[in-house]
Every structure is written in structure tokens, then in C-alpha cells.
Image (cartoon, rainbow, N blue to C red):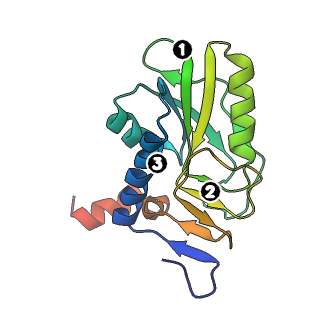
Amino acid sequence: MLSEDGKHMYVSWDEYHALIEKLALRIHQSGWEFDQILCLARGGSRPGDILSRIFSKPLAIMATSAYRDGASERGALDIARTITMARGELQGNVLLVDDLADSGETLKAVGDRVRSGMPGIREMRSAVLWVKGVSTVLPDYYVDMLPSSPWIHQPFEDYDSIRPAKLAERWKI
């Protein structure tokens, strides 16, 4: 739900999962066949995992970070040097998954790095739930275009402020 001022968007768990399912359908309906999924942690972890299950494709993970300690302002982009996957290496057609294209910087930088460092990749396409109007990159697959570029409050962000002591209190453990 978009706030009245258009600067914040609040997403429930049900809405979040519906967006992932709609993204899966858009990818499927495109007819493009891919061999592996590379998700960008943290934001792309949940969509990547669910898409991996829906399409029954192996999941690789690469950590990236541009936001620190709950900050709402982008910092310097950090990209992990390695990709984690259970077996083999990234090759063939790869679907690059993140939660959103904010500035587009992360998708572009990761795409460039992975393509240049992994000659076995034939084609890489990108998929996100949201594209903000300020993004300089338009992913191949997305569900919602957000022209006002609101700050998106995703349902799992509640865990950013919960610590073990608070959980113990909640669950009386």
C-alpha cells in the first residue's frame, strides 16, 4: 500500500508472495529457458529461493550491500568476490534475481562482473519485483514500475529491529 505522500510503500507478506508468483509467471510466459538462478543477497534471497523451487532450477547466491544498518540512504556498493552454489559453476542461461531495481547500479555492476568473469554464461537476464522510476536499468522481468520511487517497506524488515531478548520475551522462553 502506497502512503498518501507517495514516499513510502508498505508490503504485506501476502502481497510479497503474490508479487513473486506474478514474477514467475512473467518469466514463464516469456518462453525464455534458463539453467540457473543467481540471487543477490539479501534482498533477492527470498524471491530467488521461491523461483528456484517453482522452476526447479539450481540456486546460486552472491552477497551485495549498498544499505547499512537500516539506513534509507545508499552507500558504496559492496559485491562479494565469490558466488556460492552447491555444485559446479555458473554457466548457460542465468537468471539474475533481486528484489528491486532502485538506482539500477547493483544489477548493472553484478551483471558486468559476472559476465566478464564467467565465460560459460551464454545469456543473463534480470528479474525483480519492483523497478523504481529513478533506476537507470530496466530489468528483463519485473512486476511493478514505481514512478514515484517510494521507499519500500518489505514485510521481513520487522526483523531488522528484533533481537533475541525481544524474541525470548515474545515467546516467554
Distance Cα–Cα, label 2 vs label 3: 33 Å
Q: Which residue is mark 3?
A: 26
Whichever of labels 1 and 3 marks the residue nearer the N terminus, that label is: 3
Q: Which residue is mark 1?
A: 89
Whichever of labels 2 and 3 marks the residue nearer the N terminus, that label is: 3
Instruction: Give the residue displayed 56% in from the left and 16% down from the top.
Output: 91
Instruction: Please provide percent x and percent y for residue 86.
Output: 42, 18
Distance Cα–Cα, label 1 vs label 2: 32 Å
In the rendered view, does 140 fall on the left or right side of 76?
Answer: left
**Foreground label between 2 and 3:** 3
Instruction: Please provide percent x and percent y for residue 26.
Output: 46, 48
What is the secondary structure assignment of the residue under circle 1?
loop
In the rendered view, does 132 fall on the left or right side of 164?
Answer: right
Q: Amino acid at mark 1?
A: Glu
The reply to whether dot 1 and dot 3 touch (C-beta < 8 Å) is no
Query: Which image quarter: residue 121?
Result: top right
Q: Nearer the viewer, residue 37 or 31?
A: 31
Q: Which residue is mark 2?
A: 69
Instruction: Please provide percent x and percent y for residue 127.
Output: 55, 44
Q: Amino acid at mark 2?
A: Asp
**Foreground label between 1 and 3:** 3
Instruction: Give the residue displayed 41% in from the left and 25% down from the top.
Output: 58
What is the secondary structure assignment of the residue under circle 3?
helix
Mark 3 burial class by Cα count in 10 Å: few <14, some 14-19, many 20+ = some
